[in-house]
Image (cartoon, grey):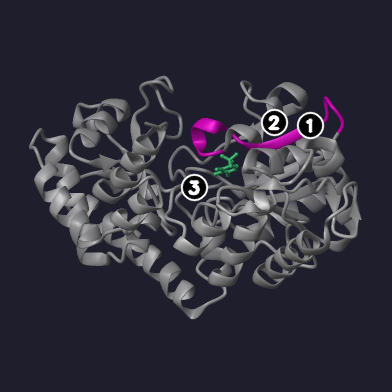
Amino acid sequence: MLEDLIWKEIERQNKELGLIPSENYASERVLKIMGTPLSNKYAEGYPGKRYYQGMKWIDEIENYAIEMAKRLFKVPYANVQPHAGAIANLAVYLAFLSPGDPLMGMALDAGGHLTHGSKVNFSGKLYQSIPYTVDPETELLDYDEIKKLALAHKPKLIIAGYSAYPRQVDFKAFREIADEVGAILLADISHISGLVVAGEHPHPYPYADVITTTTHKTLRGPRGAIILAKEEYGKAIDKAVFPGLQGGPLEHVIAAKAAAFEEAQTQAFKEYAKQVRKNAKAMEETFKDLGYRLVSDGTDTHLLLIDLRDKGINGKEAAVLLEKNGIIVNANSIPFDPNPPTKPSGIRLGSPAITTRGMGEAEAGYIVELIDQALQGKDVSQEVQELTQQFPVYEVERWKKIF
Ligand SMILES: *Cc1c(COP(=O)(O)O)cnc(C)c1O
């Protein structure tokens, strides 16, 4: 029964057209490593400083993952233990802030993440949240406004990083703002880290003091996260992750992270990241040709945010309608959204997953045409099936045999 459900999900990933920009398909090697007996080993502490015996090989594996992370991101320090992006951010706050301290991040509805000070999240409950937003006209980051807000509230930590911002981030401008008020600058590059390591988005280092990223989005690794930083902050961050927040690290996932870091250093990955942006650009152009309004008028990255207000459908209805056709996107708020988060005005989609499948700009444009037809009430499920069959994700039959 359970195995049957797992197989059905693998088949769904193959059959449906995944366009959620935070999702990707990890390599078979990454997935295989996650399913090894490494999962059995308790490893509280850090390599060479563990609270358990039997650490000979696990220490080597974790050290290797740390080395690969440092080499990939060209930074002097890495912690590879955080179980998820939310935990990585929490660890950074624990390392640098006391409860009640002012924390400045982008508002959730403008494209920030829950962990950047949202009232429903620990980050908004534990710390004094100072949300910034985008310019109402251009929907771009307004560095002058962010600076004014920082000068008025003197945040101890500023976060540059987003879940639904389609444009390039100027980390140097954020550094200057952070320096003016003496704040720690955290770059949360969860969404864009794959683009960053491939040179397809400006690198936050050395402008940012600390960098967090998930490993499963454009980076295309296992589910999890890492923290990178300037050397001097390493000790405080290590202490915050363990024993501050977590117990035993997931060594099977850490080994899979190392495999993903190896893969992300290849020429093939550089070409992948370049194609991710080209495909997103092709989607932008087709959406515009078909008369859609894009938040910020387009994209520089892997991600697009579509404003559906003039289409007579809200984001949630659109996402449900698209799913009926085998197209998977997510409903998303747009900046200054007049509608509630349960029925937001937009949909968020992107190109990382279709690019991993091997699709190019022709397919990206075609997908947008299918989205447009589906939103007008036409059934395009047959066309979607034909397309996904041409670009399989995994060898479904082989996975079936494993069970
Ligand atoms: C996805 C994301 C996270 C959180 O990652 P989880 O692994 O889901 O906890 C944090 N910050 C940003 C900007 C993200 O996009």
For the point 47% across and 54% down, which residue is it?
A: 167
Nearer-the-camera pick, 263 or 136? 263
Location of residue 20 in the rendering, given as x and y in whole percent from the top left corner: 38, 45
Tell me which label, 3 or 2, sits earlier in the chain: 2
Q: Which element carries disc 2, helix, strand or loop?
A: strand
The answer to whether mark 2 is within 8 Å of ligand 1 is no
Question: Circle 1 sits on which residue?
Answer: 102
Q: Are the residues tagged 1 and 2 within 8 Å (C-beta)?
A: yes
Residue 329 at what x, y percent from top left? 33, 40
Q: Amino acid at mark 2?
A: Ile
The residue indicated by pointer 3 is 140
In front: 322, or 152?
A: 322
> In the image, is residue 110 part of the stretch drawn in magenta?
yes
Residue 207 seen: yes
- Identify which residue is drawn at 53% across, 56% down: 192
Instruction: Kindly identify the amino acid type of the residue bearing the numbered disc 1.
Output: Pro
Q: Which residue is mark 2?
A: 130
Q: Where, quadrant-wise, is the N terminus in this rendering?
A: top left
Secondary structure under tag 1 reads: strand
